[in-house]
Amino acid sequence: MTPPSPAAGRDGTATAFRAWHRRAATGLNALIVAVCLAALAATWAAAWQRIAFEREQALAAAAQSNAGLAVAYEQQVVRTLGAAEQVAAFVREQVLTHGASGPALARWVSQGVIRDVAFTIVSVVDAEGRLVASSHASGPVNYADRAFFQAQRTRSDDRLYVSEPVLGRVSGRWQVPMSLRITRADGSFGGVVVLSVDPARFADFRALDDLGGRGLLELTGLDGVVRARRLAGAMAFGLPADGLSWYQRRGAAAEGHLLDDGRATDGVARVVAWRALADHPLMVAVGTAADDDLGPVAQRRRTYLGVAALASLAILAFATTLVAVLTRQRAVAEALLASEALFRATFHQAAMGIAHVAPDGRILRANETFCRLLGYPLELLRARTLFELADPAGQAEARAFLERRLAADDAVSPEAEAMYRRRDGRALWVHQALSVVPGPEGRPAFLVVVVQDISDRKALEQRLAHAALHDALTGLPNTVMFRDRLARVLESAQRHGRPAAVLFLDLDGFKSVNDRHGHAAGDAVLQQAAGRLRDGLRAEDTVARLGGDEFGLVLATLGEGRDAGRVAAKLLESMARPFELAAGPVRLSCSIGIALFPLHGRSVEELLAQADAAMYEAKRAGKNRLCWAGGAAAVPASAAAPAPPEGGLPGPGADAAPGAA
């Protein structure tokens, strides 16, 4: 038998090695393919997850914004209903005092006693439903079959009833009737006072432009009938609300938001926020088109999908390269270089600002977005710490936040909102996330800071907060802030035993400016008047526009009661100066009512009522004068500023004011 040659042995060994190598290569290739598929799945899953996350964020932001608009719209509706109830209560008092024929409604409207233009018709209906007085000329009319009449006849509470829209029998137009019960002295039903409002008035919202061209603004009764709806610019009313998703949910929550598919309206999906009114069986709804809210998300969606597609191509390329590494060792270095290049591209081309920060706060590196947001070149950023970039008031908080993240405090969220200062000094609000990257020994090597610019969102929040507490025309505090300031002043005055004062000021002859020169001129007068009032007070005092041409003032920390009279006298002089309008100067005057704490009342409501009554007494006495609460005689502007004597205010016959020091 011939023994095998060494070459044959080597050949057999080589063949076995090649077979093993082929099997190993096949197994490794299969592993590479499996890993490649997993990476592709993870890439696309991350892309879709990010898209879904941003979509939810956009919807949540839209819902939050619409919720704020719903609050503002609710306040507007409540103010309209409150004004209607005041007018109705005034007319009812005249009926109960002078009889059904007492109210001269048409004359009151023409003379400006009833000045709210929202109420197109004010009428009085007797207990049998007959129209006995109206601001609109009409023949015999009976309202016994109307819901607003029947509801007030059977109910016992003294509240305004807002009916569903009806076709007016006097005006011949669609109106929303609002009625208040007239109860005789013996408790029997004596009829109703009814005010009619054009449904479009309820859908006239100052922030309507914020809803976009396809926005929704709706006032709905809890009886299932839409009082007014403005949808994509078109008005509608009297529609059933049973199919509306937000109406169906109002029983479970008095307020909320949802994404409506639009099938019950016009087929447009919207982000809708709703609120139920606390004191009326009504609810408001505000909505924006979901496509408009998700527009930026749709743009980024295409970007994410493109990046995922590029990443998928990169993964496939990497897998092909890795397979080639089995035959060419150089591919290992190439793959490492490609991986490093991919990292650099991802770091520098990210849409959000990214920086690497040392544990002591020094900035090690930052991408272009981070540099652009703060306005610094990379060289200057690397010479600073993260704390120096923060707003001076928040530097201590920024340092504490970083230290807690380094301490791996699970109770501290890795995300937070912070305010940085750009290189030019402007504020930059960001949403930031800090992640700790450990070193080889497990200690923190550096932190990754990811920031996203939220300055626009913060600015919107500030504008909404300001609009909720200030008058849009004059910039002065509105009634809500006025009452809050007054309550705080009274609390301080009570605590320190000092007097305080409330002044009500109403412009004399303002209606003639509107009638003669137009509403733009009237607005200019109100703005100039607001500036004079603001300039005539101290920093701790408050001036607010309460509505129309009426202003309220709170004088805090008075040395003595007569100080309020001096201030009022100066304001009379200030308002007597000409108001400069485009058509030429216009002269007006004002009437002022003064109530002192604690002389005329100790609560907000008492002082407001006393000051209001004193102001109307000043008007009745001839205008261009001031009057103290408590029955004192009105004092003309030409007289010295009145002051309460040691025993109280001047008596009814004291037409001349004591000399002011």
Image (cartoon, rainbow, N blue to C red):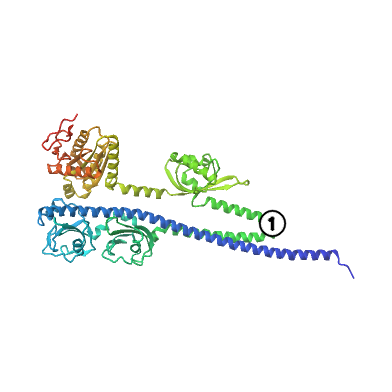
Residue 442 position, x and y percent, is 61, 46
- Which residue is farthest bottom? 1
Q: In percent of the image, x 40 and y 48: which residue is there?
A: 458
Work out which residue is located at the far right of the displayed protein and give it.
Answer: 1
| Nearer-the-camera pick, 18 or 449 | 449
| Mark 1 Cα shell of 10 Å, populated few (<14), some (14-19), many (≥20) | few
Question: Compared with residue 234, is residue 460 higher up or lower down, i.e. above or below?
Answer: above
* Amino acid type for the residue under numbered disc 1: Gln
* Residue 39 can be seen, yes or no: yes
Where 139 falls versus 457 (above or below)? below
Question: Residue lying farthest top?
Answer: 661
Task: Report the side of 379 relative to 599 (left or right).
Answer: right
Q: Which residue is mark 1?
A: 329
Q: The C terminus is located in which quarter?
A: top left
Question: Which of the image's four quarters has the N terminus?
Answer: bottom right
Tally the numbered discs. Answer: 1
Direction from residue 635 to residue 217 in the image, left or right: right
Which image quarter: residue 486?
top left
**Kind of element beneath mark 1:** loop
* x and y percentages locating residue 191 in the rendered image: 15, 60
The extreme front residue here reads: 186
Residue 249, image x and y in percent? 35, 62
Comparing 207 with 223, the one in front is 223
Quadrant of res 559: top left
- Counting from the top left corner in percent of width and height, residue 104 is at 11, 54
Q: Between residue 20 and residue 593, name the one nearer to us.
A: 593
In the rendered view, tell whether residue 287 sits above or below residue 633: below
Q: Is residue 273 visible?
A: no
